[in-house]
Image (cartoon, rainbow, N blue to C red):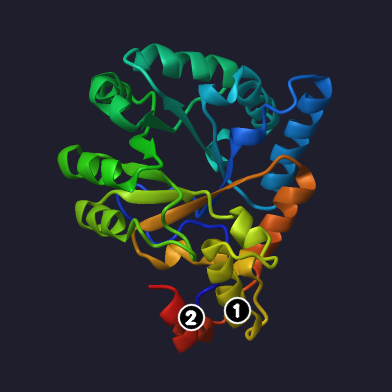
């Protein structure tokens, strides 16, 4: 009998498939002082110890975020993890080199921010051909923009912020296109306030979340646990990024990832009615 696949391992192979879960570095720059340094490094260490091997950052998160991530990961075998960063302007090559300098580590994957891909692609493609980076992607919170880009540009992956989750499947056409084009999808923004807090409210999104939570509870599954498990049920989605600002937070999220979700939950007619 084959050994069971680790919950944090990549899914089945394709052109480019990063690890199944990753740490989003958007909060690693907070606060910008020595205490913030120690907390961020401890958060990355906790993520690594929990089995996470994908780490995403950006110059937009502040120089400290990249420096802290690099400091934490420089102690680890470089071949064991993947780092992604982002570029937002025309001088993509210089931006990537600056990120590498702040990290003190090579970068595997570079995302252009939305429309910047048109100007950034030639430089990123040259870096990929030279072996400086391994993959090129586009990041956006606008699934329709990503859909247009994926249609016209040969990409390895896209990073979608929101719009595909247990509570919102708006971006499903993008995922279907990425599957057809051979581009993997990384999603973020999964643990929204509606997922984490389902208190009484007349807000339609919160009511929807409460209804889904009630179905999940029949199977002993919390709403955050189901939310983290749901996106990779679409075959185009390879990875889910989780933002965290403390070791306790990322440990708790990683523990949820490891807890199995009963397959019958996904087949429950009430859930199917709510998630479509």
Q: Which residue is outermost to the front?
A: 202
**Residue 229's x, y, as percent?**
53, 66
Image location of residue 239, percent across then percent down = 47, 53
Residue closer to the observer: 102 or 228: 228
Q: Is residue 11 something that shows in the picture?
A: yes
Task: Identify the mark at residue 271; answer none if there is no mark.
Answer: 2
Residue 176 horizontal/vertical position (percent): 26, 60
Q: Is residue 268 visible?
A: no
Quadrant in the picture for residue 102: top right
Q: Is residue 146 left or right of residue 243?
A: left
Q: Dot 1: what SS? A: helix
Q: For residue 216, which numbered disc appears in the image?
A: 1
Task: Relative to 27, say whether 1 is above or below.
Answer: below
- Horizontally, residue 125 falls left or right of residue 167, namely left
In this rendered view, identify the residue nearer to me: 7 or 205. Answer: 205
Q: Are marks 1 and 2 in contact (CB under 8 Å)?
A: yes
Residue drawn at x 57%, y 62% as measured from the top left: 203
Viewer-nearest residue: 36 or 270: 270
Mark 1 residue crowding within 10 angstroms, few (<14) / some (14–19) / many (20+): many
- Residue farthest to the left? 152
What whole-number distance in Å separates the C-alpha atoms at marks 1 and 2? 8 Å
Q: Residues within 10 Å of mark 2 (few under 14, many from 20)?
A: some
Quadrant location of the C terminus in the rendered image? bottom left
Q: Is residue 223 left or right of residue 246?
A: left
Side (left or right) of 2 relative to 151: right
Residue 153, compared with residue 169, is above or below; it is above
Q: Residue at x 23, y 39 (%)?
A: 149
């Amino acid at each position: 009998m084959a050994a069971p696949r680790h919950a944090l391992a990549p899914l089945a192979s394709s052109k480019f498939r990063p690890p199944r879960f990753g740490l989003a570095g958007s909060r690693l720059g907070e606060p910008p002082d020595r205490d913030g340094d120690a907390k961020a490094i401890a958060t990355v260490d906790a993520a690594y110890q929990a089995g996470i091997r994908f780490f995403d950052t950006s110059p937009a998160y502040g120089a400290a975020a990249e420096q802290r991530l690099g400091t934490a990961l420089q102690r680890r075998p470089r071949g064991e993890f993947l780092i992604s960063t982002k570029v937002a302007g025309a001088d993509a090559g210089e931006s990537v080199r600056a990120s590498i300098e702040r990290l003190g580590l090579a970068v595997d994957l570079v995302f252009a921010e939305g429309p910047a891909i048109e100007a950034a692609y030639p430089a990123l493609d040259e870096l990929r051909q030279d072996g400086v980076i391994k993959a090129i992607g586009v990041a956006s919170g606008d699934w329709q923009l990503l859909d247009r880009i994926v249609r016209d540009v040969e990409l390895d992956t896209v990073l979608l912020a929101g719009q595909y989750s247990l509570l919102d499947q708006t971006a499903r056409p993008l995922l279907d296109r990425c599957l057809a084009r051979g581009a993997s999808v990384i999603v973020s923004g999964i643990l929204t306030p509606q997922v984490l807090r389902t208190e009484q409210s007349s807000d339609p999104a919160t009511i929807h979340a409460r209804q889904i939570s009630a179905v999940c509870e029949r199977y002993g599954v919390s709403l955050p646990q189901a939310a983290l498990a749901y996106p990779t049920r679409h075959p185009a989605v390879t990875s889910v990024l989780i933002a965290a600002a403390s070791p306790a937070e990322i440990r708790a999220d990683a523990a949820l990832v490891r807890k199995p979700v009963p397959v019958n939950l996904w087949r429950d007619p009430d859930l199917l009615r709510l998630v479509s």
